[in-house]
Each structure stands twice: as C-alpha cells, then as structure tokens.
Image: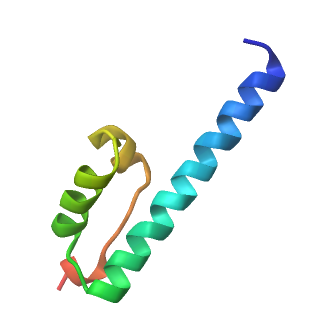
Amino acid sequence: MNNNNQKTVKMDTMRMKDIVAQLVDIIYLLCEAKGCDIKIILHQFTNLSDEERNSLNLIFSQDIY
C-alpha cells in the first residue's frame, strides 16, 4: 500500500469515527438514552466491533449519576 492510499484510509477512518460520534451525540441528547442503550442501537444499525466502538472513547455523563 503506498503512502497516498494509507492517508486516504486514515482519513476515511477518521470521518467514519466523526459520523458515529455525531450519531451517538444525537441519540444521547435527543433521546436521553443511557450508554448501554446507545451500545444496543449502534450494534443494531452499524457493523462496528466492540473494539472500534471503544476506540471512540465515548463518555456519557448521565450514566455517572
């Protein structure tokens, strides 16, 4: 894989992470969903593995209280 392809893959991965993070924010804020509910929703509508989801480092303050 050449350097340009590696950069393209890295940019696509970053965009995908941004899109998923924004989707999670929408679900979290508008639906007042807990982290466990969001995990179920992401599992149903995406093909993200647990590792990929954990790499997003999503924190849900409502789960802390």
| Residue at 62% in and 48% down | 14
Q: Position of residue 24 (x, y in %)?
A: 39, 68
For the C terminus, give its image quadrant: bottom left
What residue appears at the point 72 percent right and 25 percent down from the top-left corner? 6
Whole-percent x, y for residue 18 in the image: 56, 59
Residue 10 vertical placement versus 17 (above, below)? above
Q: Position of residue 59 (x, y in %)?
A: 35, 69
Furthest toward the top, the residue is 1
Q: Which of 42 and 10 lies nearest the eye of the viewer?
A: 42
Residue 4 occupies quadrant: top right
Which residue does the image show at 35% across and 87% down from the upper left?
30
User: In the rendered view, does 4 fall on the left or right side of 37?
Assistant: right
The residue furthest front is: 45
Q: Quadrant of residue 61?
A: bottom left
Q: How is the image coloured?
A: rainbow
Give the vertical position of 13 relative to 3 (above or below): below
Q: Of residues 42 and 58, which is closer to you in this image?
A: 42
Residue at the extreme right of the image, as rendered: 4
Left or right of 56? Residue 59 is left
Relative to residue 50, is residue 2 drawn left or right? Answer: right
